[in-house]
């Protein structure tokens, strides 16, 4: 049975979507991956879509999803992308959540979002190495 990996942020419009896409592209088929937000946006951040397209990953059909208790319960690895307050991201305070503390790309420049994208890719690649051992 594949392990479930879940990436979580507030709006599920940027960081967690990028992490899900990288994990899906680079991890073995022994994992199911998803992402969700505590207060999902209506659509993905257009700059996030653009910077991912630059490296050959198309997120145009992705939609933000609402985080559910079942998603957390049935995930063997839950990664909080960086929200820090209990109001918008109570998941941070759940036992065994990995916290990456990555900046939110919302209202950032194209160059800043590229840096965030590359940081997320690096974190995802490290996570994959850890999980596949």
Image (cartoon, rainbow, N blue to C red):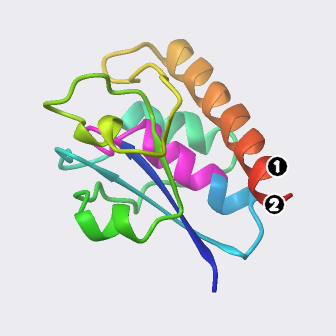
Q: Is residue 11 left or right of residue 30?
A: left
Label pair 2/1, CB-CB below 8 angstroms: yes
Locate residue 116, reporting x and y percent. 56, 23
Query: Which residue appears at 65% of the width and 38% of the height?
Result: 54
Farthest-out residue, bottom: 1
Residue at image mark 2: 132
Whether residue 57 is visible here, answered yes or no, is no
Q: Toward the viewer: 76 or 26?
A: 76
* Residue 30 point in image, percent of width and height: 72, 75
Look at the image and tell me in which quarter the C terminus lies: bottom right
What residue is drawn where x is 23% and y is 23%?
85
Residue at (19% x, 29% y) in the render: 86
State the residue at coordinates (63%, 86%).
Answer: 1
Residue 125 x/y as whole percent: 76, 43
Q: Which residues are magenta?
A: 9-22
Instruction: Say if the magenta span includes residue 67.
Output: no
SS of the residue under disc 1: helix
| Residue 60 sits in quarter | bottom left
The foreground one among 130 and 82 is 130
Q: Residues within 10 Å of mark 2 (few under 14, many from 20)?
A: few
Q: CA distance from mark 2 to mark 1?
A: 5 Å
Residue 29 horizontal side relative to residue 97, left or right: right
Query: Does the stretch in magenta take in 10?
Result: yes
Q: Is residue 66 above or below residue 32?
A: above
* Left or right for 28, reference 23: right
Q: Which residue is mark 1?
A: 129
């Amino acid at each position: 049975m594949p392990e479930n990996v879940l990436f979580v942020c507030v709006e599920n419009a940027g960081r967690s979507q990028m992490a899900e896409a990288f994990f899906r592209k680079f991890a073995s088929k022994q994992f199911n991956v998803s992402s969700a937000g505590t207060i999902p946006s209506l659509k993905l951040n257009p700059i996030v879509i653009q910077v991912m397209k630059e490296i050959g990953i198309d997120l145009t059909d992705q939609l933000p999803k609402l985080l559910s208790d079942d998603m957390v319960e049935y995930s063997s690895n839950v990664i909080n992308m960086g929200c820090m307050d209990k109001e918008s991201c109570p998941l941070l305070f759940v036992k065994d959540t990995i916290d990456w503390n990555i900046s939110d790309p919302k209202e950032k420049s194209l160059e800043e979002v590229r840096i965030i994208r590359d940081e997320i890719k690096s974190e995802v690649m490290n996570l994959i190495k850890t999980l596949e051992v």
